[in-house]
Amino acid sequence: DAGITQSPRYKITETGRQVTLMCHQTWSHSYMFWYRQDLGHGLRLIYYSAAADITDKGEVPDGYVVSRSKTENFPLTLESATRSQTSVYFCASTSDRGQPQHFGDGTRLSIL
Amino acid sequence: GEDVEQSLFLSVREGDSSVINCTYTDSSSTYLYWYKQEPGAGLQLLTYIFSNMDMKQDQRLTVLLNKKDKHLSLRIADTQTGDSAIYFCAVPDSGGYQKVTFGTGTKLQVIP
């Protein structure tokens, strides 16, 4: 199916573990984004990418790492998970300036 | 960066009109967006308005933009229980990379 997919949909892990959230889009969009959604904060940008091999920090990048070796994939890694990273994570993509972002269904991550 | 404000909660009776407001501090001259998030789902683009327009109507949805006051609103006519969701306004940043800033979201509760 065309679109943007995130995996896993749900993840429970322990503090200190490394966890990777996957994001894949089939539109060949240049721009991709990772957000976290927390009550009272709306969506906050973690990292974004303008093209393969071009990434940059957003508002809340600490504790996260991204890569973009292929246009269609934009994985987000928590190197050593902390409880404060318990959240819902959304990936989004868009083709060009002025076009809306399209969102995946999210990954609900709980860190115990 | 951009600062986007929304009220957190709105309750209306089924059949009434709903008005969700959004204020922002700055924006580039492109589109401004409204997204809808249903429980457990990602954000879906609901409607948008180009920054040189004052109003856009799309079936039951009316978007009003007051650039002078930096105020955006979404009116939903004849609100239905299926409209119960969280609504986010999104305003492009003045920088590049297609970044947008999302409001904190307004939770719309429709009372039957």
Image: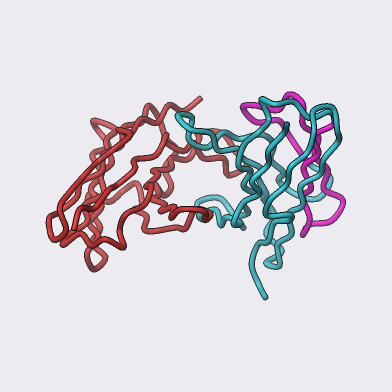
Q: Seen in the image, is B22 located left or right of residue A42?
A: left
Residue drawn at (25%, 58%), measured in percent from left and top?
B56
User: Can you give x and y, in whole percent of width and height, for residue A12 in the image?
Assistant: 74, 42
- Label total for image: 0
Q: Nearer the viewer, residue B91 or B50?
A: B91
Q: Residue furthest left?
A: B16
Provide the letter of the chain coloured cyan: A
Q: Residue furthest bottom?
A: A1
User: Can you give x and y, in whole percent of width and height, for residue A81 in the image?
Assistant: 78, 30
User: Can you give x and y, in whole percent of width and height, for residue A80 in the image?
Assistant: 84, 28
Q: Seen in the image, is B34 located left or right of residue B76?
A: right
Provide the letter of the chain coloured red: B
Q: Nearer the viewer, residue A60 or A94?
A: A60
Verify whether residue B100 appears in magenta: no
Residue drawn at (30%, 33%), measured in percent from left and top?
B7
- Magenta extent: A55-79
Q: Nearer the viewer, residue B69 or A92?
A: A92
Q: Residue furthest front?
A: A112
Verify whether residue A59 appears in magenta: yes
User: Can you give x and y, in whole percent of width and height, for residue A40 in the image?
Assistant: 45, 29
Compared with residue B8, is residue A23 higher up or lower down, i.e. above or below? below
Q: Quadrant of residue A3?
A: bottom right
Residue drawn at (77%, 59%), measured in percent from left and top?
A72
Magenta stretch: helix, strand or loop mostly: loop
Q: Quadrant of residue A111?
A: top right
